[in-house]
Image: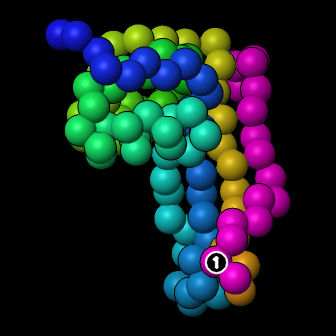
Amino acid sequence: MPTDALFLGGTSIDLIQENRYKGSAPVFMASVGGSITNSSIISAKLGLKTALLNRVGKDLLGDFAVELLNACKIDAKGIIRDSNIKTPLAIAKIDNHGVPVFSATVTSNRRFN
């Protein structure tokens, strides 16, 4: 299948704290992030045949990312699933102006046991 737009870059999972709580625990929404990945999603929404090349962990977060990208009709065959890394995770809260404020980004090139 020919590709209209090819993107190369990182994918992360963003955990965004919502402005509500379940009991005393904050509620988070999970989303796929990374500027290149977000650009590929927009490209696919515009109707372009889009493919993404990158590397994510062979873990639950990587599964989530690839499933979401496939649901967005992005060709994810170029995404390498690497069991030696963990998929990056970013944690944010939306401020009073609607802007996400990232408080932590967890990335690692080593495997955690």
In front: 15, or 95?
A: 95
Drawn side of residue 97 relative to residue 20, left or right: right
**In the rendered view, how is the structure colored?**
rainbow
Residue 87: name its quadrant.
Answer: top right
Q: Nearer the viewer, residue 28 or 35?
A: 35
Camera sees residue 20 = yes
Say left or right for 36 vs 91: left
Task: State the residue position of label 1.
Answer: 98
User: How many numbered discs, if any?
Assistant: 1
Q: Which residue is rendered at x = 61% and y = 40% of the image?
A: 35
Span shown in magenta: 97-112
Taking the spot 48% from the left edge, 16% from the top edge, the residue there is 53
Q: Where is residue 112 in the image (x, y as percent from the top left)?
A: 71, 25
Residue 68: x %, y % from top left: 34, 41
Q: Where is residue 107 in the image (x, y as percent from the top left)?
A: 75, 33
User: The residue under label 1 is which amino acid type?
Assistant: Gly
Q: Which residue is drawn at 69% across and 49% down?
A: 90
Q: Residues within 10 Å of mark 1 (few under 14, many from 20)?
A: few
Q: For numbered disc 1, what is the local secondary structure?
A: loop
The quadrant of the image that shows the C terminus is top right
Q: Which residue is drawn at 55% across and 68% down?
A: 28
Give coordinates of residue 105: x percent, y percent.
77, 45
Instruction: Determine if the magenta segment contains residue 34.
Output: no
Q: Residue 95, relative to residue 54: is it above or below?
A: below
* Extreme-right residue of the structure: 103
- Quadrant occupied by the N terminus: top left
